[in-house]
Amino acid sequence: MSNNFNKYYDKGFIDFEGNFLSTVSLIAAIISFIGLILNYFNDFPTVLIIIPLVALIFYLTIYIISKKRKNKSIQKWILSVGTLIILNLLWFHNYGYRGPAPYFFAIIYGVLIYVWHEKELQLVTGIIIINVLIIFYLDLYYPHITEEYADRQHKVIDIYSGVFFYIGLSFLVIFRAKNSYINEYKKAKNAEMLKTAFLANMSHEIRTPLNAIVGFSNLLAESDLPLNKRFEYKELVEENNSYLLQLISDILDISKIESQQLIINKKAVNLNVLITNIYNSIVISQKKKFNPDIKFSLNLLPDDFTITTDETCVNQIITNLVDNAFKFTDKGEINIKLSISENNVVIEVSDTGIGIKEENIEKVFERFYRIDNNVSKNRDNSLYRGTGLGLYLSRKLAALLEGNLWAISKRGEGSVFFLTLPLKDYQLLLPKKSKKKSNSNKELMTKFAHLKIMVVEDDQFNQIYFIELFKRFKINITIAKSGEEAVEILNNNCDFDLIFLDIKLPGIDGFEVLSHIKSVDCKSLIVAQTANAMEGDERNCLNAGFDKYISKPIKKAIIQKVLEDYIKP
Ligand code: ADP
């Protein structure tokens, strides 16, 4: 807990003490200024005018520097040590125990408690105690090293103006601390409430598709189920499956963004191609439930071009916008339009759906925000299923790509969502010659049938799945149930064309099996397959020497692509 706190504290996420630095230095500057004026008009010795003047300059400098977030720790040390030097000078020239200086040590210590934290606070406490003991000793045994007041009147004015300083300083610091604590408390309470609402929402959102998956999977096992029903149920299982995956991946992405761990991978991206792919995959996935009353269209730019951006993020944002457009549109048109304006590429996703009330347009980009969409009573409610995370995540991603995401909408008439991306490293592409038609399906299947494949997988359900999946390509695979078994098989026979290797295995893991494969000089193509689809996993696997990386759930199309790439001449 303490380690975690320090981690966040150091990163500046929690900067409670840091925030006090500017307040304390400003208050100290104001007090120095008042002291300077009082001393000047009371005809105090010049040195008692110079000390508050130096203090004023010193605290104003700290105040200005403290506005910058850098090197807070050094600034705090300068403030503390500088203050002690000023206090000691004040004690010496402001009549030692006879004047107000000793009490300043007490009140200044109260201020430093707000500025310091843990071990450093203990150190500062120690320094102040030693300092006070020294001046106490000097005042006790050498009372004449400090002077006497010129007269009683000066003393009274000085002591009582000191008292007002103590009161002012205590009030400002304690008042500021109180407000700060109240704000932090409110924020924590709010976060707690959001978390509770989130958990309740998630529990519902996860159970709903799970229930459908479990229920329809059980129904699929009934032997007298007609074929058309089987297909229908299979589709429903798949649909709920992808919804569940989307949900999990949104939650992971949000937690990565919020802990500043999402890595942006920029490269040249052809937006015409990217948007066409999204369009095609949506048309395919929506085919069955496609409402004939909706026209789905694309407006691309006439020439192909690339910009430097993160393909996965852009894909995620546009897919989310188009998914929403389908969710909230009953009839009319959904359109994706690509255009260029000034220094930006603009991607517009427009629909003629239910629209959003003007006062809610900005709110839809907030976390977990979902409008009560119960406007169309005869509409299937499940079509409005959602977590309220999509647009929040999309806007965060757009910002990470140095772009913007916003919307215009009219209730009952439709919405237009705009995504802008900077036109950095824009490059026009020359038209490509049309590629030769790829191998026919039959030819491919014949080639696949000759492949020798081993799958290393410890989970028995996944083993059955892989056996069934490869049967679709007429391939009988060899299964190794553990890393040890894989090593044993490979010691006897190393002539596999491809090895699909799970990374997380009990006993020796995928990376160790990989180094064994390399050490026995197998020529197989080694594919990492893992359920850890986190950013960085793919890079780790490829760096370790895997030829390819695929993440679970592994669909037929993914395996087909790996096999096709392998047999390509
Ligand atoms: P959800 O998963 O609920 O769709 P989003 O963050 O993507 O989460 O959207 C938040 C809310 O914004 C939705 O619940 C919906 O009320 C509203 N919304 C988003 N897109 C549209 C749209 N195209 N038309 C009307 N309302 C929309």
Image: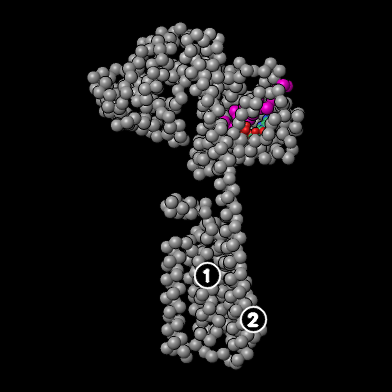
| Residue at figure coordinates x 72%, y 29% from the top left | 375
The stretch drawn in magenta includes residue 328: yes
What's the coloring here? Answer: one colour
The Cα atoms of the two marked residues, 1 and 2, are separated by: 24 Å
* Residue 188 to residue 201: above or below: below
**Does residue 21 appear to the left or right of 526 in the view shown?**
right
Label 1 belongs to which residue? 110
Dot 2 falls on a residue whose secondary structure is helix
Q: Residues within 10 Å of mark 1 (few under 14, many from 20)?
A: some
> Mark 1 near ligand 1 (CB under 8 Å)?
no
- Residue 271's label in the rendered image is none
Residue 387 placement (x, y as % from top left): 59, 34
Tell me where the magenta segment starts and ends, as one range: 316-333
Asked where in the image residue 515 lies, by quadrant, the reply is: top left
| Residue at figure coordinates x 69%, y 19% from the top left | 294
Front position in the image: 20 or 297: 20
Q: Main secondary structure of the magenta part?
A: helix
Q: Does the rendering let one see residue 54?
A: yes
Asked where in the image residue 421 lies, by quadrant, the reply is: top right
Q: Amino acid at mark 2?
A: Leu
Label 2 belongs to which residue? 38
Q: Amino acid at mark 1?
A: Gly
